[in-house]
Image (cartoon, grey):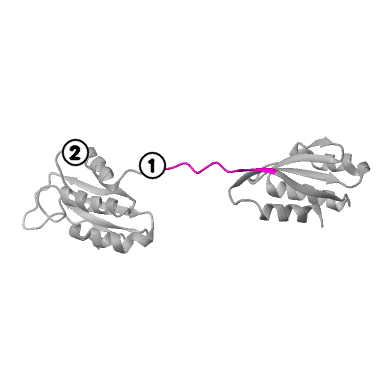
Amino acid sequence: MSLADQWDGIETGLDPRWHDARLKLTVDDDGRVERALALLGPAGPGRSGREIRFYVQRTDSPIGSEAVRRMLRRIDAEEIAGALTLVATDDAPPEPVVSRPTLAAEWDAVIATLPSDWSDLLCEIELTSSDHVDRAALLCAPINVFQSGVGKPGFRFRVAHVFGYGASPGMVRRCFVRLDDAGIPGEVRVLHALSDTHPVGTQGPVWMVGGKQV
């Protein structure tokens, strides 16, 4: 079996989380060891008799998996026979845990940035997965959410500070607490905001978004 094929077999058997591996190449012919060592030069090999030890990393680098495969193919092309064995391997470090604030906390932060005389908001909640859309729509029914219309999983909704058309800030927060309790993550943002409006004979301002009134 060629050395490149031997590496394919070793790599297939590694834990999916592997980060780097230490390999040993035992060359059959004493007289070909130096040439094999030279062809593995970028991997920083070390020699002991007919054994050559070197590292390989999973990532794309000078000693990455594919780079080492190319080196081994060059050795195969020169008909240098040997046995490739795995000495040891290290798993990849665990993925960092990303701390995401709750939706209720995000909403509190949004409200805190608004001027004291704000009156009307057009807001958006973007969910991290389309799998949550139906459940989120049910939990947010009291704030009259509607589809965002921009291809993202989530909804838009209106908020009225004191009076007019839109949910109250407190009702929005209670709905977001429901989403948090259900383990539905997302991101909240204000798309449009108005201050100190005084509707006369209407329920509040109308925004034109994508050619539609909202």
Q: Residues within 10 Å of mark 1 (few under 14, many from 20)?
A: few
Q: Depth check: give the residue in front, 93 or 192.
A: 93
In space, the residues marked 1 and 2 are separated at their CA atoms by 28 Å
- At 32% across and 43% down in the image, what residue appears? 101
Circles 1 and 2, Cβ within 8 Å, touching? The answer is no
Q: Quadrant of the C terminus?
A: bottom left
- At 66% across and 54% down in the image, what residue appears? 13
Q: Residue furthest front?
A: 87
Q: Is residue 4 magenta?
A: no
> Residue 115: which numbered mark, if any?
2
Q: Depth check: give the residue in front, 38 or 144.
A: 38
Q: Depth check: give the residue in front, 45 or 195.
A: 45
Residue 195 is situated, as x and y percent measured from the top left of the image, at 16, 44
- Element on which disc 2 rests: loop
For label 1, the residue is: 99
The amino acid pointed to by label 1 is Ser
Residue 10 is situated, as x and y percent measured from the top left of the image, at 71, 52
Chain part drawn in magenta = 88-99
